[in-house]
Image (cartoon, rainbow, N blue to C red):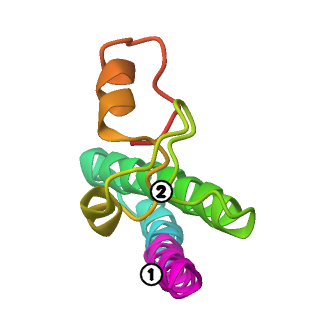
Amino acid sequence: MADLLEQYHSARLKIEREKTLLRLTHLREALKFEVGSLTDRKDPPLKEHEMVLTQIQILERELQWLDDALQQAKQGRYGRCIRCGELIDPARLEVLPETTLCFACKTILERQPHIQTIMA
């Protein structure tokens, strides 16, 4: 049963990774097209450009989180908090399959503003 659950989570992470990678590729292509068309204009839409760049950064971060979760799955540690080692609530994993922190540790880290690089 545990093996089936691990397979399910690994498959789900891979699907999420592919979807994220597809969105990231699409945004990068849109940005290339946008940059090419900006040279023809006098007043480039900077806000739109900045929004696309921000979305790309967010997706790159999500991709890294998914890769980290996949690595944990390969090592048989998926679903355990990387901070305290406790099991992550299955409902939390269902909503955020890339999460590597339990809710309690995520809450603690959110209160420490100098630690912002660790995933939900």
Q: Amino acid at mark 2?
A: Glu
9 in magenta: yes
Closer-to-camera residue (27/38): 27
Residue at 70% over, 61% down: 71
Query: Where's residue 72, x and y in %?
Result: 66, 58
The answer to whether residue 21 is above or below residue 95 is: below
Relative placement, left or right, of 75 versus 97 is right
Residue 20 percent location from the top left of the image: 46, 73
Start and end of the magenta stretch?
1-25
Which residue is the site of mark 1? 19
Q: CA distance from mark 2 to mark 1?
A: 11 Å
Callout 1 amino acid: Lys
Q: Which one is nearer the viewer's eye here, 119 or 61?
A: 119
Query: In the rendering, at what x and y percent does residue 90 appear?
Result: 32, 62
Which residue position holds label 2? 62
In this orientation, which residue lies closer to the viewer: 96 or 56? Answer: 96
Residue shown at the point (36%, 60%) measured from the top left: 41
The quarter in which the C terminus is drawn is top left
Relative to 3, say whether 74 is above or below: above
Other residues around mark 1 within 10 Å, as few (<14) / some (14–19) / many (≥20): few
